[in-house]
Amino acid sequence: MWQLKALFGMTLALALAACSNPQYLLHPTSNPAAAKTRQGLDSIIDTTTLKPLAWGTFLSPPKGAFFKPLLTTDSRNALVYVYRSRSNWSDAEIQAPGFFVNGEFISGLKSGSYFWFEVPSSTYNFTAKRPLAVVYLQTIFEVDVLFEGGKSYYFRYDEDNPGPKKLVKGSPLTVIGPLQQLPEAQALSEIAQTRSMGVGRVLYADRQPQWSPFELYTEAQPVEAARLDALTRAPTQVRTDEEIQAEQMDEHGNVRARAGASTWWNPTTWW
């Protein structure tokens, strides 16, 4: 028995001596190389495992409502639209590509459709992958994009006329492969013909209570009147306090009794 213990001790001593840092052998999780490999595997799992898949237009054409501009839930956030114009190529697609932000699945994108998401101001890893049966495997593009708060971004996904495989240095707009950022004026004329893929997503934003969504933020800016929906505008015919008080007083200056009350109260006869 003691021979086995001696052999084990000698083997461990030789292994520690051969290792550049014995700590890595005793605690493999502290090895930077192992940590990097683990992070890479986690990223692969996050973006390639079973995710919600969207059938292509060939099997299921988009049936959502046509595009309508939205307002952000928080004026400090950025609003991102991604759309895909119709074409013979995309109309024949069986499965739509999937889009990911920081490894989180956002939406598929059919021919003639669009989706949107809202994020706080920051840099995000934006990726699209092509599905194979029930797993996303092939990366179509991957890019880090800075989304500034208070701005709207429009991206066209076009496989018929893809851009360069690498970003062009110094370009104000992000163009990589089939992902093409467009100015708002040009994008609005194209995205207006597309249908929604469904409910959008608000990512990584602070949860706001419904009873007071904007009063909590001192840096929040009011939304421009031109962007307000007609149903959300404040009423213009509002009675003043003087008008309300006048309606509650009778001709003698006494407060009128409320409906259902048997008596009325005269403040001048209280004492």
Image (cartoon, rainbow, N blue to C red):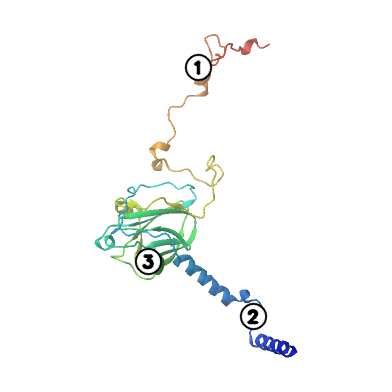
Front of the two marks 2 and 1: 2
Q: Secondary structure at mark 1?
A: helix
Q: Which residue is mark 2?
A: 25
Q: Upstream in the sequence, badge 1 or badge 3?
A: 3
| Disc 2 residue crowd, few under 14, some 14–19, many 20+, Cα 10 Å | some
Q: Which residue is mark 1?
A: 247
Q: Position of residue 43 (x, y in %)?
A: 49, 68
Furthest-left residue in this view: 88
Furthest-front residue in this view: 1
Q: Is residue 246 visible?
A: yes
Residue 112 vs residue 264: left or right?
left
The image shows residue 185, relative to residue 9, as above or below, that is: above
Q: Position of residue 108 (x, y in %)?
A: 38, 59
Residue 126 picture quarter: bottom left
- The quadrant of the picture occupied by the C terminus is top right
Q: Which residue is mark 3?
A: 133
Residue 67 vs residue 259: left or right?
left
| Disc 3 residue crowd, few under 14, some 14–19, many 20+, Cα 10 Å | few
The CA span between labels 2 and 1 is 86 Å
The image shows residue 188, relative to residue 145, as above or below, that is: above
The total number of labels drawn is: 3
- Contact check, label 1 and label 3, Cβ < 8 Å: no
Q: Give the residue type at disc 3.
A: Ala
